[in-house]
Image: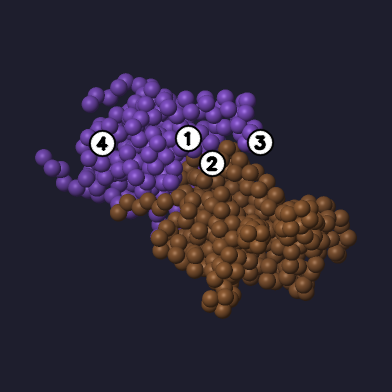
Amino acid sequence: MSQVQKTIGDTLLKVEGISLSFGGVKALADISFEIKQHEILAIIGPNGAGKSSMLNVINGFYHPQEGTISYRGEARRRMRPHVAAKQGIARTFQNIALFKGMSTLDNIMTGRLLKMRRNFLWQALYWGPAQREETEHRTFIEKIIDFLEIQAIRKTPVGRLPYGLQKRVELGRALAMEPELLLLDEPMAGMNVEEKEDMCRFILDVNDEFGTTIALIEHDMGVVMDISDRVIVLDYGRKLADGAPDEVRADQHVIDAYLGVSHD
Amino acid sequence: MMFFLEIVISGLTTGVMYSLVAIGFVLIFKASGVFNFAQGVLALFAALTLVGLMEKFGLPAWLAIIGTIAVMIALAWAIEYFVLRHLVNQEHIILFMSTLGLAYVLEGAGDILWGSDVKVLDIGLPQGASDWLLDSYGLYVEKLEIVAAVVATALVVVLAVFFQRTRIGRALRAVADDHQAALSIGISLRTIWIIVWSVSGIVALVAGIMWGSKSGVQFSLSLIALKALPVLILGGFTSIPGAIIGGLIIGVGEKLAEVYLGSMVGGAIENWFAYMLALAFLMFRPQGLFGEKIIERV
């Protein structure tokens, strides 16, 4: 797969000196990095390296003891989840967090909640502007459903879907928020080769067509090297390396800590 | 025949009163997956506050009701601030335990603030039998129970519209399903919790007014929550229409059982009929009549 030539923009998000610990366990130690506009950034590292914690700090699930998070130039000590969402940060979860009782359609529709502007009294009456608005959102959702090729499961309660499709619905919900920054926590975990290829295609297309910035955690090195513009390596809560995929692959620290001896 | 009809009507109206309490449970269960043990005490607390405002401050009924609604909203805020906020993403059982504690705190607070003696609640609701029904059909129906039925119907319509149609309703369902996911799409858990506890506090006030007008405001009011349990098991914990129909079935069922079967087993069926019915449901249809079927992948 060849990298499409694209323009990486200015810094969208910057974390500086982030330290996070749970009791005596240090999850993150003095981590700093940037996420630039339009790039696909991969965060890799062995289990327990602090990758998910890092995403949780960015969208405000965890509050670091030290450090600052600057999003669109605005620096703050900590994020709050609903504020992060309002400002255009969407995410998916390692262990899939969907609304299991709702259909695929309803799940993706919840991603539009923040975009709904009409007063709830109007909505209650389902009349005039509120009805028009609902239709607009529905149209948008249908586009996402087409894009992710999940037309057939539109009405299925997501609890019944196989794992791979659930991951896709979760991505759909995140996309419904029209995010500027998309955080994906192991989007391809537990998928077969075919599903992985589909997911890769979706991620690249989202990045390409909507210019969405993407930060993802992934264990499959093949995938990481293929789709990302830049790779950050974490190990025991510290940052080991930060650079283009080829540089990182050649980095001796990384090889020692993570990739192990080369397999040639 | 007239006798049978009278029993059914009396059962239906009692059932409506059960439903009023059950709806409060359903609201909080829908929005947080938590069985709110404090719901009965909430009704007691609301009724006590209402009586207190009328007696101690001499407020007219309508003003006292508005005042009580304000108190219930403030209470919802306080519960969120002091209890729920600290329990985000915890197991449901932990949240349940916290409502258990809340029940005791509220009960004590009600006692300290308004005293523990039995109080008469009179906000001017009609009392006694409906003359019209008595004269023209020979039916004995309490006026208060008719009012309760009308109020419950109105309440259900408003709540149904609120939950089915509005953005807030959708957000509530999302929060009930998965806290993390709800947060990630920009729902503020705190706002949602304050809203749902306020609404549930107001429903508790309605239940408190009805039961208080019927049998006085006293500690035993908080025990009607126990009667709401079988109603919930029948109707399903997540369904407001289910709470209504469950209430009606239990109300009618226990009255009929008392009258027609009571003599065979020596009476007092009314006291345990609801629980037996609930037990039967638990064995054959654990999600209730209208509850969401639980799907689990293994």
Three-letter code, disc 2: Arg
Does A131 appear above or below A222?
above
* Palette colour of chain A: purple
Left or right of residue A186, residue B238 in this image: right
Gap between marks 2 and 3 measured at Cα: 14 Å
Gap between marks 4 and 1 measured at Cα: 24 Å
Question: Disc 1 vs disc 3: which is toward the camera?
Answer: 3
Does B292 appear above or below B107?
above
Q: Give the residue displayed 53% in from the left and 76% down from the top.
A: B264
Left or right of residue A230, residue B137 in this image: right
**Which residue carries the number 2 mark?**
B170
Q: Counting residues from the N terminus, which is met first, the one under dot 1 or under dot 3?
A: 1
State the residue lying farthest toward the right.
B58
Question: Disc 4 vs disc 1: which is toward the camera?
Answer: 1
- Sort mark 1 into few (<14), some (14-19) or many (20+) by Cα contacts within 10 Å: many
The answer to whether residue B224 is visible is yes
**Which residue carries the number 4 mark?**
A195
Q: Position of residue B8 (x, y in %)?
A: 62, 59
**Which residue carries the number 1 mark?**
A109
Tag 2–tag 1 contact (CB < 8 Å) = yes
In the image, A158 versus A234, the foreground residue is: A158
Gap between marks 2 and 1 measured at Cα: 9 Å
Three-letter code, disc 4: Glu
Q: Counting residues from the N terminus, which is met first, the one under dot 4 or under dot 1?
A: 1
Q: Give the residue displayed 57% in from the left and 73% down from the top.
A: B262
Q: Give the residue displayed 29% in from the left and 29% down from the top.
A: A201
Q: Position of residue B44 (x, y in %)?
A: 70, 65
**Which residue carries the number 3 mark?**
A121
Is the same chain shared between marks 4 and 2?
no
The secondary structure type at the circle numbered 4 is helix
